[in-house]
Amino acid sequence: MLIQEEILRLKEERQAIILAHNYQPDEVQDIADLTGDSLELSRAAATMDGDIIVFCGVDFMAETAAVISPDKMVLLPSLDACCPMAEMITADELKLVKSRYPDASVVCYVNTSAEVKAESNICCTSSNAVKVVNSVKEDRVLFVPDRNLGLYAQRFTKKRILPWDGFCIVHDRITPDQVREAQALHSGAIVLVHPECRPEVIDLADHVASTSGIIRHVCNSGEKEFIIGTEIGILHRLKRDCPTKKCYPLSREAVCWNMKKTDLKKVRDALISLEPRITVPEKIAERARETIERMLAL
């Protein structure tokens, strides 16, 4: 039996839902029930029939799914698949900075641990960060942990954003020279970049959007050629969803190796053993859930 067939059989037996982030390996995306951004996957899974969520992504994503779906078992096939940016801030560090800025509202990017979300006022995603920042009543905003997303939001608000000095190791190393090289190689192609990129890269882009926003833009645009400034795993999804469009990676080095730690064998083994299981202590989960729900209420 092919491993894909075995996974599908086990999925039915376990009444499981398989989620895959847009940056996952091609073969993992192909066996998933849903592929997308981290929060949209967790929200969708909460409404689906199934007792088990197999989250093919990184640790904070599985935590978010456990927070949103407390009655479902959440499995992370590769337990060591972490998000380096999420690890650039701890709850204790955030508490210390909060004490120094008691008049500031804390906006946390979804790319954070449940503990950090629990210490924040409201959560945001890369697609709604500007809206969330503008929604808070305070004039000063502690934006954690992504400095580049915070600086991007600052362009569209009169509030004073105090960005944490964290970053995505994939997006932060994309350079303006790489943008110019890609434009020279693919003359006339539309440049789309993720807001986790540096400001000087964003300045050269035609459009800035989340991974799902990039996919929507490519599929709905009348243009035919695009330079994609995010992790290269998205190219598989773009080829599947927008087969008539030509998409080129801004940088072939834009690889998140933590996202690539998941493979079909690990997905199968997780369905067999029901491990590794991700849980969040209820007191932390309750506060983190409130932070997410404040965002969803917008």
Image (cartoon, rainbow, N blue to C red):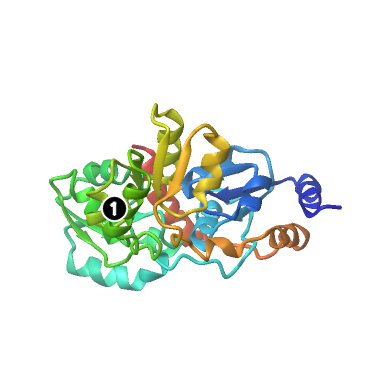
Residue of label 1: 180
Q: Nearer the viewer, residue 17 or 234?
A: 234
Query: In the image, 197: left or right of 232?
Result: left
Image location of residue 38, percent across then percent down: 49, 50
Identified at 52% across, 66% down, the residue is: 257
Image location of residue 163, percent across then percent down: 23, 61
Q: Nearer the viewer, residue 224 or 7?
A: 224
Residue 242 drawn above or below residue 113: above
* Mark 1 crowd level (few <14, some 14–19, many ≥20, 10 Å Cα): some
Res 106 visible: no
Query: In the image, 274: left or right of 207?
Result: right
- Disc 1, SS: helix
Identified at 39% across, 30% down, the residue is: 223
Q: The C terminus lies in which quarter of the figure? A: top left
Image location of residue 152, percent across then percent down: 24, 50
Q: Nearer the viewer, residue 217 or 245?
A: 245
Res 6 visible: yes
Q: Nearer the viewer, residue 228 or 164?
A: 228
Identified at 57% across, 70% down, the residue is: 80
Q: Residue furthest right?
A: 1
Q: Residue 131, located in which quarter of the rendered image?
A: top left
Identified at 64% across, 52% down, the residue is: 28
- Number of labelled discs? 1
Residue 113 drawn above or below residue 132: below
Image location of residue 148, percent across then percent down: 27, 58
